[in-house]
Image (spheres, rainbow, N blue to C red):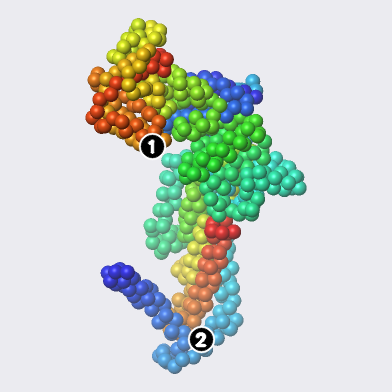
Amino acid sequence: MDLVLDEIGKCYGATWVLEQIDLTIEGGQFFSLLGGSGSGKTTLLKSIAGIEKPDKGRLLFNGQDIVNTPMERRPFNTVFQGYALFPHMSVFENVAFGLRVKGVDPGAIRNTVTEMVERVGLSERIHAFPAQLSGGQQQRVAIARVLVCEPKVILLDEPLSALDASLRGQMRRFLKELHRDLGLTFVFVTHDQDEAMSLSDRICILNQGRIEQVDTPDTLYHAPSTTYVAEFIGTNNLIPVTAGGETEFGRVSLEVESNATISIRPEAIGIGAASDALNAAATLVDRQFHGDNTVMTFRTNSGRELTVRRPGRGDAIEIGGQAELSLPRSACTLISEGRAT
Amino acid sequence: MSNALLAWRGAIWLLLLGAVLAPIAAFLAYGFFSVEAGQIIYDLTIKNYGEAIGDPVYRSVLGKTILIASQVSGFCFVLGYVVALYIWRCGKLLKYTLIFIVAIPLMMSYVIKIYSMRGLLGHTGFLNQILIWLGVIDEPLSAFLFNLTAVRMTLVFALLPFCILTTFVGLERIPTSTIYAARDLGASSTRIFWKIVLPLSLPSAIVGVMFTFVLSVGDFLAPELVGGVNGLTYGRLIFSQFGIAFNWPLGAALSLVLMLISFAVIALAGWLSNPRWMRGGAV
């Protein structure tokens, strides 16, 4: 049940919006396509759905090339951005649509639809029209409408972007539970790294039509392979390193073959000198209190800004005050691709 | 509310009452007067309304006119829908070029359009020449002009753009994602048309049909210019009361009948074009 993208490329005019996308999405995974606008994530999803036809490459599902299969015959279903419900149909009719297309007999449709609407918690609104539902309810209808078709893969195009913050949290949990219960493959497009991190088994980070890195959220966070990923996921400090492992704060214990970049997360940096760490004298230039933690920006004597996150208030140092920062060698990660300045 | 705002509101209401409603009211008031020897007698009577509703001649003309307007609207609806659907499915450049072409006649005077139809249908007109050239007829026919069919054709020609444009707007308002969603769920193009495109564009098409009906039921220029002796329609009947017959009171009474019919059609179209699913709110 794996979905394999083999050298997929898509161009509009002379511009390649997707270049050479090689990707394997394993069956049953919650897989996210993450990227900013213009990254090609939506085009990639549309290529999988069959809305867009790639200009090159193969799309293999279960070993079969489906690149020429029209969207209505692919075993995938899509939850569209903005839901794309049928406004003139009730919740029941929206959910029943896919079954009516298949020619399922009315009695079976009634049972399946009723059950599915109940599952997404909308039994009381089953005769309502989409315009009478809240955003979260419409979202659930869109999901139910897709689930009754029993797809092998569910494609979700920014499904949470239209919801307000509190509802988004609820829907995340709902999606995660749904994924766990169904064991289906979810391909999830989002620009929200937090959303991707908290939901996904694996994430593919796209940038300008190319894949930056495909990995688990944990690896993406702790071992980004490009500077783009290191800066895109969470907050990070990037420091140039020379071949041999020398930085402006001392030598790192990594094997560095050519000039590259190391990254260190704000929460790994300590205040006060430490052994087995790169130590740097710095001045506090900004402090932002977030309740459970405080994010501080220091400027080192070498002129580099470092972001440090400490639990609690972190108000021991005044703005403009001096401190010794310690960057533990074990927390430094080497990024081979791209170079910080 | 500030005084300035209050003054503006007052002015708008005054304009509405004074410039729009008052002339109509004054005109309808004529329906309660009568005419003797070419002079209007200002004594109140309901004789005109009785005549307008009861006279079998007027009733039959009204029936015939409603039938013609219905035929014209029905024809415009089907033809307008098909054309709008075709234009909607064209590529961007062609689409807006075609819509521009459809809109051109709307910028022309109605009278010019009628005369151009006369040119087309007349004895030496385009239609006759084509038929002779095709060998269908030997001599030019005069059967195309000065009858009710000519009236119908002229009205369709003049009113079709309304139907095309309103339907087109309705089609354009359907989000592409809605159509993709249907396709994604496995629907064929035929099913997508009948279950998604048609129901979602119908409210707009109905508004177009309403325009067509209201404009054709009251029209007097087309029957006057291309209708000939048989082309007596209700609009022409009213027109003659204000002209040749010089019976303004009867004309006003007949106009009221026409107005009520138009209102009824507008109300019906309003109801049909605003189905329950569009309204939102509580169930």
Instruction: Tell me the subunit letter for badge 1.
Output: A
Q: Is residue B209 left or right of residue A273?
A: right
B270 vs A227: above or below: below
Q: Amino acid at mark 2?
A: Asn
Tell me the crowding category of disc 1: few under 14, some 14 to 19, or many 20 or more residues within 10 angstroms, Cα based.
few
Element type at mark 2: helix
Q: Residue at x 49, y 91 (%)?
A: B45
In the rendered image, residue B193, in percent from the top left (x then y), is placed at 60, 46
In the rendered image, residue B30, in percent from the top left (x then y), is placed at 43, 85
B34 vs A282: above or below: below
Distance between the alpha carbons at the discs numbered 2 and 1: 83 Å
Q: Is residue A262 left or right of residue A173?
A: left
Q: Residue at x 29, y 14 (%)?
A: A248
**Residue nearest the observer in this picture, A276 or B243:** A276
Q: Residue at x 34, y 32 (%)?
A: A314
Total numbered badges shown on the rendered structure? 2
Tell me the crowding category of disc 2: few under 14, some 14 to 19, or many 20 or more residues within 10 angstroms, Cα based.
many
Q: Is residue A302 visible?
A: yes
**Residue nearest the observer in this picture, B140 or B85:** B85
Q: Is residue B229 left or right of residue A313?
A: right
Report the residue marked by disc 2.
B48
